[in-house]
Amino acid sequence: MQRASWLESKPKAQQAHRLWQVSLAAYQGAKLGLLITLAHHLYHAMHGVTPGEEIVAHRLLELVGFTVGGSIGLAAIAVLYNCFVQARSC
């Protein structure tokens, strides 16, 4: 006797992929950007690398850049995923 998986036992209507929330993906991307910034700054601190220009402006620019970049990146991935799941062209 073969046992059916959990997904196979669900009705077809419930097996459909759920759409991703773009706002949640953007928030998660911002958190990912902050984590990457932290790792980048810790790497520089451990190896004694200091930027030649003003250090506060340099770090703040990286913080904003990685955070905004991560937010836009994951939001774009969520939009593309939703487009493919809904089987329409975007």
Image (tube, rainbow, N blue to C red):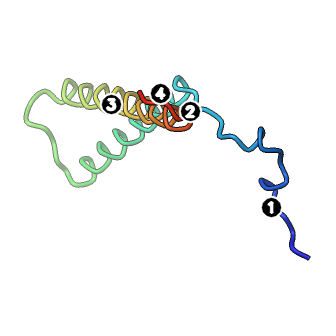
- Would you name the residue on which mark 1 appears? 5
| Residue positioned 15% across, 42% down in the render | 50
Q: How many marks?
A: 4
Q: Nearer the viewer, residue 77 or 66?
A: 77
Q: Secondary structure at mark 1?
A: loop
- Would you name the residue on which mark 2 appears? 86
Q: CA distance from mark 2 to mark 1?
A: 24 Å
Quarter that holds the C terminus: top left
Which is more N-terminal, label 1 or label 2? 1
Q: Nearer the viewer, residue 47 or 16?
A: 16
Q: Secondary structure at mark 3?
A: helix
Q: CA distance from mark 3 to mark 2?
A: 26 Å
> Can you give x and y, in whole percent of width and height, for residue 56 in the image?
22, 26
Quarter that holds the N terminus: bottom right
Instruction: Classify 10 Å Cα crowding around label 2: few (below 14), some (14-19), many (20 and above).
Output: few
3, above or below 56, in the image: below
Q: CA distance from mark 1 to mark 4?
A: 33 Å
> Closer to the camera: disc 1 or disc 4?
1
- Would you name the residue on which mark 3 appears? 69
Identify the amino acid type marked 1: Ser
Q: Is residue 21 left or right of residue 58?
A: right
Which is more N-terminal, label 2 or label 4? 4
Identify the amino acid type marked 2: Gln
Verify CB contact (< 8 Å) between mark 2 and mark 1.
no
> Closer to the camera: disc 1 or disc 3?
1
Q: Secondary structure at mark 4?
A: helix
Q: Secondary structure at mark 2?
A: loop
| Residue positioned 42% across, 40% down in the render | 35
Identify the amino acid type marked 4: Ala
